[in-house]
Structure formats: structure tokens, C-alpha cells
Image: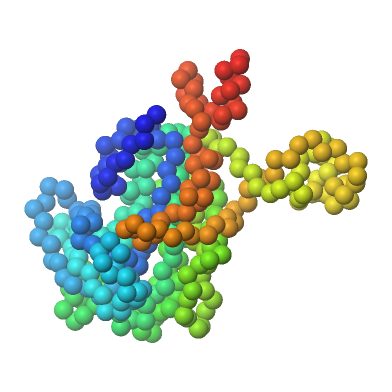
Amino acid sequence: MENKIIQGDALEELKKLPEKSINMCMTSPPYWSLRDYGTSTETIWDGDENCEHDFNIKERKIHSGTTKSKIYGDNSGHLNEYSSKDGFCNKCGAWKGQLGLEPTFDLYIKHLCDIFDEVKRVLRDDGTCFVDIGDTYGGSGGSSGHKEDTKNLGYNTQDMGAVAGGTKTYQAKSLVMIPMRFAIEMVNRGWILRNTIIWYKPNCMPSSVKDRFTVDFEYIFFFSKKKKYYFETQREGNNEYFKDVSTPKSFGGSGHIGNNFANRKDSPIVHTIGRNKRTVWRICPKPFKEAHFAVYPEELCKIPISAGVPYKVCPKCNKGLTKEEFENAKVL
């Protein structure tokens, strides 16, 4: 099978793919209100596609943590006064702007899940989806709110983000809980949430904050399309601690090796393959010299791909097969 690279708007390109044609999806969308990827990524969302749009485009201050990507030549860190230009259509209500820079987190979640509706369409019934997504802190108000001349855009500072004294949705400086809101909406749209995985970063970026702990992890959500799906068990551990044995007596009630039995010299060890992989993945981010601000470590990609992508698909029954199943089938 040849590798194929498709470059373009995710939602538009997904619409071109055949239904039930993809085994697995792994992705990390732009996080809400944290990075500006440039005007070339602007999209028209919602509204009437036949409308002759009349957009009320205005400059709007965005979250104090927002940075410009290296792609656009600005890596100066937090830009408290950085602005975005976006707006709604006066005729049909469509919004023109970048995914991730929506004026409200509700609109961001909607746009994100609209894309994953299309992912669900192109996934096979035995397909899976892994999504890495981070959270956002509510701003202090001065850099999150609008100027006086931007209050007529169809949204307001309270809807848009945290302002001084808190809002109807969350207090200033509070985590917005974007990952949880996203996961709940995905489940509401019919996805099955199988795991919440923690990507723990031992070498995370240092933080200068003095009134909270440094964040050293991100969430990865593991979704399936149906109750039954392809999944190849992933193992972890070593010979010393995680051993498969020939009798149930070796295991305690919690699934761990019973200490008394495991330490016996006559323990009937059959083979050592490690335990079922846990949901905290200790993986260090890796440096990348090219023009991309947030690159997956290769190891982080390998685990979902190994778990969710079949070695082969049976041409007769269309079932995904592991390498072992495929080789056994060949023998038979």
C-alpha cells in the first residue's frame, strides 16, 4: 500500500473520502484560544452556503496565552495584546475565522465535533479514533475581552472568555475544561469513549507561574465507532515484574501477581509478554527543527497505530487481522 498525503482543509478533504474507508484516525486539533496559525487557515463555518455573505469583520483581542506559530515568524511567547480578525455574517450568521480562535468555547466545540462527525462517516465500523487535546486557562479580562467597538459582533465578553470578577460560565484564571466538554459532546453525538489517556511529559516546558502547579500532561481520548471494533492489545513491563503464568493462583484479586506465589522458586512461568498497557503514557516531547510548533513524538504515534491499525484486512470477510491472525490464516 502506498502512503498518500492529502493537504487541505480537514472538513472539506474528509468529505471527499468514501464512507467506511478508514481504519483509524489519530489527530490533535488546534487548542482553543492558544495559537494563531495565520489568515490562510481561515474558514467559513455554519450559516447558509448559498448566502452572499456580508461579514462584519472586526479586530478582537484574544486569550492572553495566544502565540503566533513559528510558521509565521513570531515566537515571542505570550502576547497579551495580540488580536484576531473574525466576524459573523450579517445575513445568515455564518462565522469566518480560524478553528481554535472562535469567540466562545461552545462554538469551538461545535466546529470541532462537526469535523469528527465526518471522521465518523469515513471510519469503518470497526474503526477507532484517538484525539490529543489540551485545556485553556481563563484570562484576566483585560486581554480576553473586547474593545468598545467590538461589542456588536453577536457575542460579548462574558460569552467569549473570563473577565475581571468572573463570568456566568467560569471564573477568571480557571481552567475552561475544554477536553471534558469535547469528550461529552462526542459521546452525545454517538461516539463510544473507551479510555481517557494521560500523556505524561517528564521534560515538560518550565512554567514561571507561582500560584499553581506546572502542567506536565495532556489528555488523549480513545473513541470507537461501534461496540465491537479492531484493537490489538499493547503490552508493557519487563521480565522481572510482569509475568504470564500457567495457573490462576498466581494472580491476586486486583489482577496483579500474587506476591507469595510469584516469589516461589517453583513458579511455573510459561512466557513473559508484559501486562496490558496502562492509561498513563510517559513520553518525552522531542525537538523538531522544521516549521511546526507542536510535533508528535514518534513513540506517541506508535501506540495508537499499533493498537488500531490492522496488519491486514481479510478480502473475504473484511475483518481486520493482527499479524499473528494473518499468518495463522495463511497456514490454514
Position of residue 301 in the picture relative to residue 37 (left or right): right
Q: Is residue 272 above or below residue 82?
A: above
Q: Residue 206's x, y, as percent?
A: 49, 74
Q: Point out the image quarter for the N terminus.
A: top left
Q: Residue furthest top?
A: 332
Q: Is residue 8 above or below residue 97?
A: above
Q: Residue 167's x, y, as percent?
A: 37, 77
Write down the quadrant of residue 16 in the picture: top left
Number of labels in the image equals: 0
- Of residues 214 and 239, the one drawn nearer to the viewer in this rendering: 239
Position of residue 319 in the picture relative to residue 47 (left or right): right
Q: Is residue 115 above or below residue 67?
A: above
- Image point (59%, 26%), residue name: 325
- For residue 107, say whether it is visible: no
Position of residue 215 in the picture relative to residue 256 (left or right): left
- Image point (28%, 61%), residue name: 71
- Of residues 226 and 4, the one drawn nearer to the viewer in this rendering: 4
Q: Point out the image quarter for the C terminus.
A: top right
- Image point (19%, 81%), residue name: 148
Q: Residue 38's x, y, as percent?
A: 23, 62
Write down the quadrant of residue 129 in the picture: top left
Q: Residue furthest front?
A: 289
Position of residue 260 in the picture relative to residue 99 (left or right): right
- Colour pattern: rainbow
- Image point (39%, 75%), residue name: 138
- For residue 86, say whether it is visible: yes
Q: Residue 160's x, y, as percent?
A: 31, 71
